[in-house]
Amino acid sequence: MPLPRNPPPPSAIVELANVTLGFGDRTVLDGVTLAIEENCFVGVLGANGSGKTTLMRAILGLVPPRAGSVRVLGQAARRGNPAVGYMPQLRDTSAAGRLRGYDVVAAAVNGHRWGLPRLGAAGRREVDWALDMVGATTLARRPLAETSGGERQRLLLAQALIGRPRLLLLDEPLISLDPSRAQGVVTLVRDLQQALRLTVLFSAHELNPLLGAIDRVLYLGSGKAALGTVDEVITAPILSRLYGSPIEVVRLGGRIFVMAGAHEVGRDAHLHEHNDADHAHHHAHDHGDLG
Amino acid sequence: MFAYDFMVNAYAAATIVAIVAGLVGYFLVLRGQTFAGHALAHVGFAGATGAVLTGAPPLWGLVFATLAGGIGMGAFGERLAERDVAIGIVLALSLGLGLLFLHFFTAHATQATALLFGNVLGVDTATIHALLGIGLAVLAALAAISRPLLFTSLQPELAEAKGVSPRLVGMLFLALVALTTAACAQIVGVLLVFSLMVGPAATAQALTRRLWPGLLLAALVALAEAWLALALAFYTDWPTSFWITALGGVFYAAAALRGRRG
């Protein structure tokens, strides 16, 4: 097997052992074994439907594996694990848009407990801390509906930090962002990851915005996974195996292009979703905070 | 006007219902489930007319039918509760069933009008006690579920990952909407439940983006609309339900205009 595999080190925060994942009659991961170390920024890449979201949902305990085991911090993955923070893929936020950013972020404070949504002093400190960490304290006074895509991502990132997780799962945070703003989000996540010593799984369609920031790449495709440094994983043999077709890797001016024939992989899917997201968020204004 | 017992009763009933409807309505509007709330009222119409047919009190028919409808909708999950076509078909079917029940029970045409458009001036003490019981139960339950309800309304995927069951919370919430609908129908009738549950909450959300002020404002706007409408109805002799809908429209339009300028 040419795929690089790390033997599970003692500091592994996520361990997959022979994991098979799927939904309906689809299998997205087939017998995958890997371990992600603590304090590591991992870019999760792969074509649409390669299982990026499903893998995150399995780590969250929302999708039970069909076979094998998913362990987080040495324990079986389970819902409500306070050590795991999550930022779902941006979707229709019409309900959240009616409230100001602060209240949306604050909804995550003990949000799973019964009772009135009263914050208390400790809760307010937690929200203030999270907003401060992403530099969104001022931003949070505005209604969510009146923030730009990049600003919204920062607020949702603050929400993911509530509860002080050690592992952060970010599902496509760059969707619908233009390149300079995407870079801003990547830099922010990198700073957070280092300041708080987090492990971050950051899924994306394109590798280039993540270059220089990530420690590892987790590339998914054809039910398989490859985990390693960019140089170890982004190679023609490994990607050809993951895509099930001949792939060429072209390096140009510090950027890496993954080509299937004359076609750049990931680029079209990204543009496509970009349009969808624009359609869903036509209220977003550009306030230039993330450049 | 408070020299008349029926006006005192009307104010008592309207006060209870307005506060509950404003607060429950706030979450209903936030979740974008207003159409589901509207449909529940029609399910209640079938229940109430069915109760009249069997000789039971219409209020309990309303409560039973809306509760069953609310829990049923909630059990099918968030996605069904937001599916307009399915809800619309249930709505039409309920109204049709109600019509059939009325057809078998032709003696009281006024009863049908009261169910459809409300008859707050005809509220007796027993009904006020029932409304008070329903109102307190709904408020207590809403207080108990409001934190996970807010979380799952704003961020369903994250809430689920954090251990909230969106289906359970959604089902409990629709049960509360059902009870509120039954209470509202006593004042404005099943066709106009929207006016007390959705209008004031939408008005409040147009005026403030903050959670607690928004909740408070929704209850206050509902209360103001109900009280003013009763006074206007007393002095003009026009139906109370008309005045509630008229005030609801005026308040909402004013709030929307102000929101657009601000």
Image (cartoon, rainbow, N blue to C red):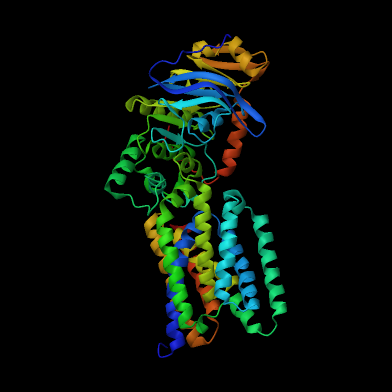
Vertically, is A8 above or below B231? above
Q: Measured from the top left, where is residue A181 in percent x and y?
A: 46, 31
Please report the residue visible at 65 percent of the width from the left and 84 percent of the height from the top.
B108
Vertically, is B61 above or below B68? below
Seen as rendered, the residue at the extreme left is A121
Please report the residue visible at 45 percent of the width from the left and 78 percent of the height from the top.
B128
Q: Nearer the viewer, residue A233 or B146?
A: B146
Please report the residue visible at 48 percent of the width from the left and 69 percent of the height from the top.
B251
Seen as rendered, the residue at the extreme bottom is B3
Please report the residue visible at 54 percent of the width from the left and 69 percent of the height from the top.
B182
Residue A178 visible, this orientation:
no
Q: Measured from the top left, where is residue A204 in percent x and y?
A: 53, 27
Q: Measured from the top left, where is residue B195 in percent x and y?
A: 53, 69
Q: Nearer the viewer, residue B81 or A89?
A: B81
Residue A89 visible, this orientation:
yes
Q: Quadrant of the C terminus of chain A?
A: top left
In the drawing, does residue B236 fall left or right of residue B69? left
In the drawing, does residue A120 fall left or right of residue B69? left
On the image, which quarter does residue A75 sit in?
top left
Q: Nearer the viewer, residue A34 or B222?
A: A34
